[in-house]
Amino acid sequence: MAGYLVAHIQVTDPQGFEAYRDAVPAVIERFGGRYHIRGGKADVKEGNWDVPRLVVIEFPSVARAQEFYDSPEYQEILPLRLNASTGSLALVEGG
């Protein structure tokens, strides 16, 4: 069953975030991940949508998504995102 990394991000330092955005795709790929949504424009139809940047990445499983997140390669670049943005991130089991 697929696993998803879902993140709501507010970029606070665009230049710093660019370094993260350039580095992370290769690490995602290494763990079998692929982007479904990467910060595209949202057309809100209902409710309050307070998500400046939505990211959804599919992995072969939640376990693989967890391996990605815990990997030394990702942990090395994670501070780039944490220093350049705020937000929330969850690993979600697919249906």
Image: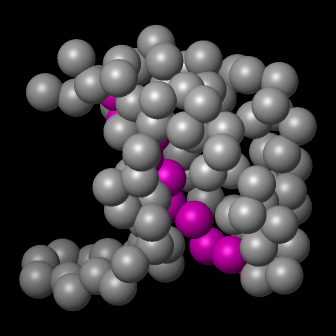
Residue 66 is situated, as x and y percent measured from the top left of the image, at 55, 20
Q: Residue furthest top?
A: 63
User: Is residue 8 inside the magenta stretch?
Assistant: yes
Residue 84 visible from this viewpoint: no
Q: Is residue 87 left or right of residue 37?
A: right
Q: Is residue 36 left or right of residue 30?
A: left
Which picture quadrant has residue 77? top right
Residue 58 is situated, as x and y percent measured from the top left of the image, at 36, 39
Depicted 10 relative to depicted 30: above or below = below
- Tell me what residue is drawn at x 40 percent, y 30 percent: 59
Render colour scheme? one colour
**What is the span of residues highlighted in magenta in the rendered image?**
3-12
Q: Nearer the viewer, residue 84 or 2?
A: 2
- Tell me what residue is drawn at x 46 percent, y 37 percent: 33
Which picture quadrant has residue 91? top left
Residue 80 visible from this viewpoint: yes
Residue 47 is situated, as x and y percent measured from the top left of the image, at 18, 76
- Tell me what residue is drawn at x 58 percent, y 39 percent: 28
- Tell me what residue is drawn at x 13 percent, y 27 percent: 95
Q: Is residue 64 left or right of residue 93?
A: right
Q: Nearer the viewer, residue 6 or 46?
A: 6
Depicted 36 relative to depicted 93: above or below = below
Magenta-drawn stretch, dominant element (helix, strand or loop)? strand
Depicted 35 relative to depicted 58: above or below = below
Q: Nearer the viewer, residue 35 or 7?
A: 35
Q: Is residue 33 left or right of residue 67?
A: left
